[in-house]
Amino acid sequence: MTTEAGPLSAEQTTAVLSAAVRAPSVHNSQPWRFHVTASGIELRADPARRLPIADPDDRELRIACGAALFNLRLALLREGVEPSVTLLPNGPTGALAIVRYAGDAHLSPADAVLYAAITRRRTNRKPFEDQSVDTEARHDLVRAAELGHARLEVMSDPEDRAAMRRMLLAAHAQQLADPAWAAEFAEWVGRSQAARDGVRLASSGPQPEPQDAWVFRDFALGQGAARTPGKDFETEPMIAVLATYVDDAYAQLQAGEALQRVLLTATSLGLAASFLSQLIEVDQAREDLRELLGDAVHPQVVLRIGYGSPVAAAPRRPIEEVLDVD
Ligand SMILES: Cc1cc2nc3c(=O)[nH]c(=O)nc-3n(C[C@H](O)[C@H](O)[C@H](O)COP(=O)(O)O)c2cc1C
C-alpha cells in the first residue's frame, strides 16, 4: 500500500507510480525505484537490476529510467499536479531525477493523448504489415523526438540501410559468441507466464530465421514455435535511430524521455515498435552507426516501427516492490 504524500492521496500515488513502471526497459529489467516524500518523488536507479554485460555503462538503464520519468510527468499532470523536474544523473544516492510537486496543473489535450497510450504501448516483436508508415505519422514521430531534445533519424537511404544490416549482423554475432552475454541474456528471457519481470516466452516473437533481413534476438532461447513457412517479417520496415547531441548520463536520461514520447506518439497513431539494441550495446556498432549518421549525433536507441497485430502486455512488479517511503 502506498501512503498519502504531499498533494497526492494514496490512490493517486499508486496511479502515478503504476503509470511510471509501464515504461519499457531492456529485458524488462525494471531498473528503477521511487522514493516518495511530502514534497515530491525521487527516481533512483536500482543497482541490483543492472545488466553488467549488455549494458556496462548503464546507458540503457538510464534510458529506461528516463522513459519512466516521462510517464511520471504525464501521470502527475493527470492528477492535477505540476511536476518540476531536476535531472541528477550523477546524484550521490543513485538519484537520477527529483520531481517536485509545484502547484496545480492540468493535462493538455495533447498530453491526454499520450497519457492514454501508456497502458496500450508495448514492444511488438511480431512481423508488421507490409505497409509503409505514412509521411504525416513519420513527421509526428520526428517532432516527438525534437520536443524531447533528441533527433529521430529515419533511415531511408538503401545503402545506409544495407550498411546498418551488416553492422547489426556483426554486432549480433559478437554478442552471441560471448558466453557471459549469453548467460546474462538467458537469465532474463524465456520466462513463464508467472514471471513479473524479464521477457516471457509468450512475448518472444517468432523464431528467428536466416532469411530475416533485420536480425532479432531469440527471446525464446530456441524453444519458440517453429515459423509457418512464408511467414516472414515485413520487407521494408521503417527503421529509425533516436539520437542525442551529446552523450553523457544527462543526455541518456533525456533520450529515455524522448524515447517514451516517440513510443507513446507511435501508439496513439496506431503504430507498433520494437528495438534493435545490438547496434547500441556493441561499442563498434554504435561507433559505426554514429559515423553513418554523420558524426553529429550519438545514437541511443534503434527502433523498428510499423503497423502490427495485437500482443499481450508484459508484466510489471507490484508498486510496493519499487517504492521507498520516508
Ligand atoms: C533501452 C531499451 C533497449 C531495448 N532493447 C530491446 C531489444 O534489443 N530487443 C527487444 O526485443 N526489446 C528491447 N527492448 C524492449 C524491452 O524488452 C521491453 O520494454 C520489455 O520487455 C517490457 O515490455 P514492454 O515494452 O512491452 O512493456 C528494449 C527496451 C529499452 C528501454
Image: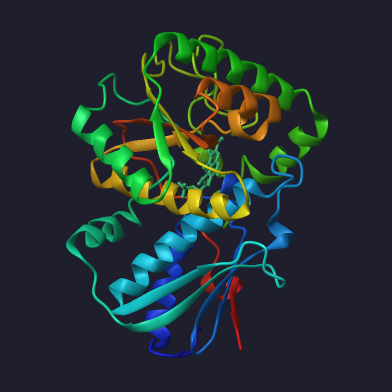
Which colour scheme appears in the figure? rainbow
| Position in image of residue 282 (x %, y %) | 68, 30
Spot occupied by residue 244 in the image (x, y as percentages of width and height) = 50, 42
Report whether 151 appears left or right of 223.
Answer: left
Which residue is at a point 37% across and 21% down the rendered structure image?
237
Figure check: 12 above or below 154: below
Q: How many marks?
A: 0
Residue name at image x 39 percent, y 13 percent: 157
Q: Is residue 309 above or below residue 109?
A: above
Residue sitting at 77 percent across and 37 percent down? 183
- Residue 147: percent from left, percent from top: 34, 50
251 sits to left or right of 143: right
- Say which quarter of the image contains residue 101: bottom left
Seen from the viewer's position, the closer of residues 219 and 52 is 52
Query: From this viewpoint, which residue is outermost toward the right?
Result: 179
Residues 227 and 290: in front is: 290
Quadrant of residue 117 in the image? Answer: bottom left
Measuring 57% from the left and 27% from the top, which residue is drawn there? 290
> In which quarter of the view is residue 71 placed?
bottom left
Q: Quarter holding the C terminus?
A: bottom right
Whether residue 315 is visible: no
Please say whether residue 82 is visible from this viewpoint: yes
Question: Whole-percent x and y of residue 110?
Answer: 21, 58
Left or right, 113 with respect to 87, comes to left
